[in-house]
Every structure is written in C-alpha cells, then in structure tokens.
Amino acid sequence: MIIRYFAWIRERLNRDEQQLELPDNVKTVQDVLNHLRAIDEDFAFVLPPETVFRAALDDELVELDTPLGSAKELSIFPPMTGG
Amino acid sequence: MMGISVTIQAEIFDAGDLVNQFTRDMPEAGAVATFTGLVRSKPEQPIKALILEHHPTMAQKQIERFAQEAVDKFDLLAIQVVHRFGEMKVGEPIVQVMAASSHRQAAFDGANYVMDWLKTDAPFWKKEVGADGAHWVEARDKDEAAKNKWTK
C-alpha cells in the first residue's frame, strides 16, 4: 500500500509518501497507524495516538475503523483548511 | 455554461471575468450568487503570502461531489467552482463559487452549501508566510458547525 502525507504531517515526517508491505493482521486504517508507530520511531513521534488528523482511502474520506479493503492508497493529513 | 464545472489551478483568475463567462448563454437563469474567497492579512498579524497545499485527485472528486449535491438539493441550473493552490499574495482570490438558478434563494443556498462543505471536507491546507516565518493555519470549530447545519 502507498501511504501519502500532507501539510504539517508531511513536513514533520520529511516524506511525501512511502510504500508499505502490510502484515495480514493489519485490516483497518487504525491498524496501519498502529503498525507504523510500532516499526517507525519518527512516525510514532510525529503522530502519537492523541494527534487530530483525518484519513482517506483512494480519495474517499474515511473513519479510522474503516477496513482497508482493496484500497491502494491511504492518505493521512490534518483537518482541512481550504476555501 | 450549464451543469457542473470544477477547476483546480495555480493561476490567478479574474473574479468578474469568471462570472461573466458563467452567465453567458443561460437564458433561464434569473439569479446568480457568487462567492469569492480572498487571501487576507490581519493588522495585528500581517502575512506576506499564503501557500495552499492540496491533494489533487481527492480535491477534484470532493468538490465535484458537493457541486452535484448542491445542484440536486436546490435545483440549480449550473454551478462552477474554481479553487487555486500554490503561493498567492494578499488580496488575491483563492476560490470562487458561482451558482445559477431561476430564483435568488436557491442560488444563495447553493453557493453557501458548497463553501460550507468545501471548508472542512475538501483537501486543502493553508500555510501563512509572515515576517517571523511560515505556519500552518488551524482548522476552526466554527467551520465544522457551519457545515453541520445542512442535512444531506
């Protein structure tokens, strides 16, 4: 799966995106975040569990308990401030 | 123009030119409501520029969705949204929503509906560049409340 980052999350992680092989027990958006926190110190530091952020699977806004299904891309970003 | 048009671009636009083009060849339209969002600078915290980051594919889909919902909900004749990204100066336009309908209330409501949803659910992020550096703008609870007044 491709994980994409935006705005201050992208800046603080110092990466736009990454390719990630997911173990079988990673089934929801929340599972991906927990997995990344476990394997990546920078990620755990920048996005601790209390962080307010939003997520999208293949361009659709989703809740954190949403199953990944066949999605190819997960985007992680702060609350939006357009307009 | 009839139907729905959504454009996401870096280039500056002329607010008046856009609305004149929009209303051309629309004989049934009795009303057009136009909202233009501008880059603003507060006297107590002046900024030099605004940088807008976005998620291109998702932004296009989300705004098209809100525009379609507005057309269906308020029976609009047409709606057009232009949203910019990248760096812009104080006073420049960021976004413009134009809604056309037979009568005024639907046009007002249509433009308002799209803006309320766009503020909280379209993937754009503002970064203000001031004398003391750049910082990301935080989302406002007020915007979330404004969106929640609409029932889908």
Image (cartoon, coloured by chain):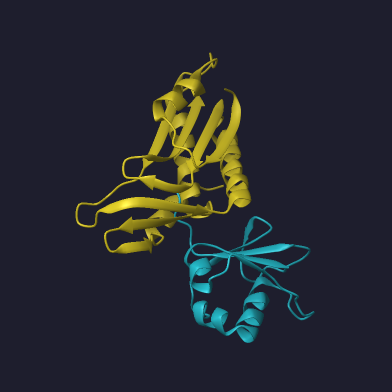
Chain colours: A cyan, B yellow
Q: Is residue A33 left or right of residue B30?
A: right
Can you say which quadrant of the picture contains the N terminus of chain A?
A: bottom right
- Residue A67, quarter of picture: bottom right
Q: Judge whether residue B39 can be spotted in this image.
A: yes
Q: Which residue corresponds to the image point at 49% horizontal and 21% vertical from the top-left?
A: B21
Q: Is residue A29 left or right of residue B46?
A: right
- Image coordinates for residue B109, horizontal then vertical, percent: 45, 36
- Image coordinates for residue B145, horizontal then vertical, percent: 42, 55
State whether residue B6 is above or below residue B102.
below
Q: Which residue corresponds to the image point at 39% horizontal and 45% vertical from the top-left?
A: B88
Q: Which residue corresponds to the image point at 42% horizontal and 29% vertical from the top-left?
A: B33
State whether residue A66 is above or below residue B145.
below
Q: In this view, does B144 lie to the left or right of A18?
A: left
- Image coordinates for residue A23, horizontal then vertical, percent: 77, 80
Looking at the image, which residue sits at the far left? B44
State whether residue B95 is above or below residue B24.
below
Q: Judge whether residue B76 can be spotted in this image.
A: no
Q: Which residue corresponds to the image point at 30% horizontal and 47% vertical from the top-left?
A: B40
- Residue B1, quarter of picture: top right
Q: How many marks?
A: 0
* Front-most of residues A7 and B11: B11
